[in-house]
Amino acid sequence: MIETLLTPLHYEYMVKAILVSGLIGGVCAFLSCFVTLKGWSLMGDALSHSVVPGVAVAYIVGLPFAAGAFITGLLAALGMGFVKTKTALREDAVIGVVFTAFFALGLLLISLNPSSVDLRTIVFGNILGISDPDIWQVVIISAVTLVVLGLKWRDLLLFCFDPNQARSLGLNVRVLHFTLLTLLSATAVAALQTVGACLVVAMLVTPGATAYLLTDRFGKMLGIASVMGVGSSLVGAYASYYFDGSTGGCIVTLQSAIFVLALVFAPKHGLLATRSLRHAAS
Amino acid sequence: MIERLLEPFQFAFMVEAMAAGAFVATVCAVLSCYLVLKGWSLMGDAISHAVLPGIVIAYALGAPLALGAFSSGLLCAVATGYIKAHTRVKEDTVMGVVFTGLFAFGLVLFTRIKSDLHLDHILFGNILGIERGDLIEIFAVGGVTLAIVLALRRDLLLFCFDPGHARSIGLRTNLLYYLLLALLAATIVASLKAVGIILVIAMLVTPGCVGFLLADRFGTMLAISTGSAVFSALTGVYVSFFVNGSTAACIVLAQTLLFIAALLFAPKRGLLRSRRTDGQPTPVG
Amino acid sequence: MSEPLSIDVRDVTVAYPNGNVALHDATFHLAAGTICALVGVNGSGKSTLFKAVMGFVKPVRGSVSLGGLSLREAQRRNLVAYVPQAEEVDWTFPVSVWDVVMMGRYGYMNFLRIPRAEDRRVAEESLARVGMIEFRDRQIGELSGGQKKRVFLARALAQRARVILLDEPFTGVDVKTEEAIVELLRELRSAGHLMLVSTHNLGSVPEFCDHVVLINRTVLAYGPTDEIFTEENLARTFGGVLRHFRFDESTIQKHDGRAVTVLTDDERPLVFGKGGHLEYSRRQEHEKVVEERAEEPDDK
């Protein structure tokens, strides 16, 4: 029994995949606290789709994928900001137009060069087959993100909570805005490797949302989200050995299940708790 | 030269693809006007991803795939609404959590259930390989959806514009809410085979935005959206024949180009227009 | 036209899904031919009560009825109209002034909402009544604050509603439009309509409202304005939030011992004395001012 459970760990690629997933899961979860509080969840989704043409180009011309992805991610973010300020269109519509355009461009590029890029790798990730240079890219991105978040989390929290107050304290709000966008793009790129473009947003939202249901303190929220992100990614990657390699599917399904548990049973903000409050009123 | 340009029309599959593309574009464009105005653009994103588990389960049970897709799409919308109403988590976050959860679940199911479904076709459409049966399904589902939207277009517009007033004159706004969601899910189901669940999001947002930028009456907005979407679909299919690339991507990129054109040149709200008026103040006098 | 209409709100308790009780045991009754102000601070449940009367939220307990009819039935008969707050409306919507007023007629139209000659006539008449007929083809975002308000009033008129709810109708509106709206409301009152106006503009309440409902999480008092709109009741409604400026303690000179109180809910009144100089609400810290002015000649 124990022998079969340990089988996945006998393969070097599995161990690598599990560790890298855990790292990415932790970084994304840390960032997810800011993303959910700022209301940028769908920005995460949009950016993760927008990096696709960059990844495609990078693979086609043989550059590090992170560089290409990062550039198109930021281009998309700038494009959204530009269109939003110049028109009366709602923000969600602008996000929708821009990210689908980028994704379509990526898809077209890939369909024109089927030999150099594997579409599935981008859309679903391929952590089990991740190459060593790619691992280095992910580790560097994670390290930089964690350092920036670790040093600047108080400023970013204030920016998410009350941008005007941040401005009045003399903080440069534009820089903070840009920093958060950059971190979001960077982690989206890293997460692309593990779960693929479609599911990145889950890594960037679900842990934060779960923690938000469980606590009212930001410090605790960071802790809960990170533990959940790391834990679910380790377990999910491990379990994907039994699921024909759908690592992203396993990790995110696991995270969603934890969210549902928190949703129902959270002591103060869960469905059961609020229901009894409502009953008390009538 | 001309012969080369007319070549695509000699293939039945190209003509069918154009017909299906234009029709799907029409249905999506009409609906996109409502979504853009209601602020539901990303609801299309959520529902379209969420249809995946429904398709896989329907396949496993031997039920019609469209039915499965429709149910799980609707489940996503209803669950989002319920969680948002009953917790303090923001709507966009809830949406992100729910649809990715369903999509991931669909992926896991897909790997466990041996099927002859092509994941690529579900995700990106396969408009050039569309079969007669698919075509009939597209026209049936899309036709019914379109008929309902057009018949109720004034009620739906009022619901988007001022739900308070809609309620005060006795319209059942709850019903309209779920109806609009159901129509959205049905549209996505109809578009699945043609453009796939990822790029249908563009079909459900971009034409409405083009119309919004160019029109200040709803009727005009509908007409412009539909016109631009149909034109993009035809152009996209046609161009993809020559470049030999993803057809759905070509359609969406054609729509994007029209959007950029509208953004720049719209007579009232275009960027170039406003710059010109800024630069040359009207002489006083 | 039809029988006089009343609003009956009985023991209404509203709790939101997250467990918050926004309003409890609210009860009041209003008869036709009334302009009634709904007064309370932000967060007092004012907008919740409004929503309950409109049927936007379902009370966990209690009932709302109009002239003995259930809310749904009253709405189906087009008896209730709602003039939303400016912030609730998306002004970029591609609809014209005419389209908005026509929406008031939807309840009278068939399933496809195709207007008939009668609908067009009523819409035109309503627009003319608020003086907006020449703007009929404007996109709604191109209007000024006061014009926007008038368009939505025209929609309520076109609806031929007997009960009209107005949510903060005077915010963002110029003085002239405010007067025009008040005049129109008075006309409607004499025609037997019932208007419920939510407002935080205390000063204007006695000017045009004959009834008031005071709320703070529940209905504290309701009835004719001159009976209910007392200092004591308002103090209860606003708790410590209300700003007082009592003249019996102020730096104003030569008051005869009888107090005049200025009340205002969110802004502090600026008071000038008889000589046009600034007045302060307390005598402490301003002894010098009081002395100086005491030496001034009597301005009687």
Image (cartoon, coloured by chain):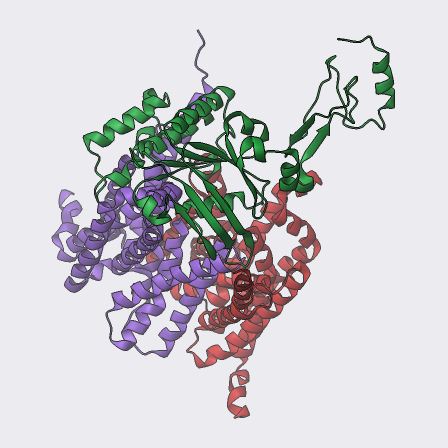
Chain colours: A red, B purple, C green
Task: Give the residue at x 58% y 73%.
Answer: A231
Q: Residue A60 in the image: state x and y as whole percent.
A: 42, 57
Q: Locate residue C28 relative to residue B137 in the image: left or right.
A: right
Q: Compared to A260, does B232 lie above or below?
A: above
Tell me, yes or no, if residue A108 can be seen here: no
Q: Residue B199 in the image: state x and y as whole percent.
A: 34, 55
Q: Compared to B95, does C117 lie above or below?
A: above
Q: Nearer the viewer, residue C109 or B188?
A: C109
Q: Quadrant of residue C94?
A: top left
Q: Tell me the quarter of the image containing the N terminus of chain B.
A: top left
Q: Quadrant of residue B193?
A: bottom left
Q: Compared to B196, does A2 lie above or below?
A: below
Check the image and name the residue furthest to the top. B285
Q: Give the number of callouts.
A: 0
Q: Locate residue C265 relative to residue A49 in the image: left or right.
A: right
Q: Compared to A257, does C94 lie above or below?
A: above
Q: Nearer the viewer, residue B144 or A98?
A: B144
Q: Nearer the viewer, residue A24 or A220?
A: A220
Q: Residue B158 in the image: state x and y as whole percent.
A: 33, 41
Task: Give the residue at x 40% y 58%.
Answer: B46
Q: Tell me the quarter of the image containing the C terminus of chain B.
A: top left
Tell me, yes or no, if residue C104 can be seen here: yes
Q: Quadrant of residue A198?
A: bottom left
Q: Residue B275 in the image: state x and y as whole percent.
A: 44, 26
Task: Give the residue at x 29% y 44%.
Answer: B155
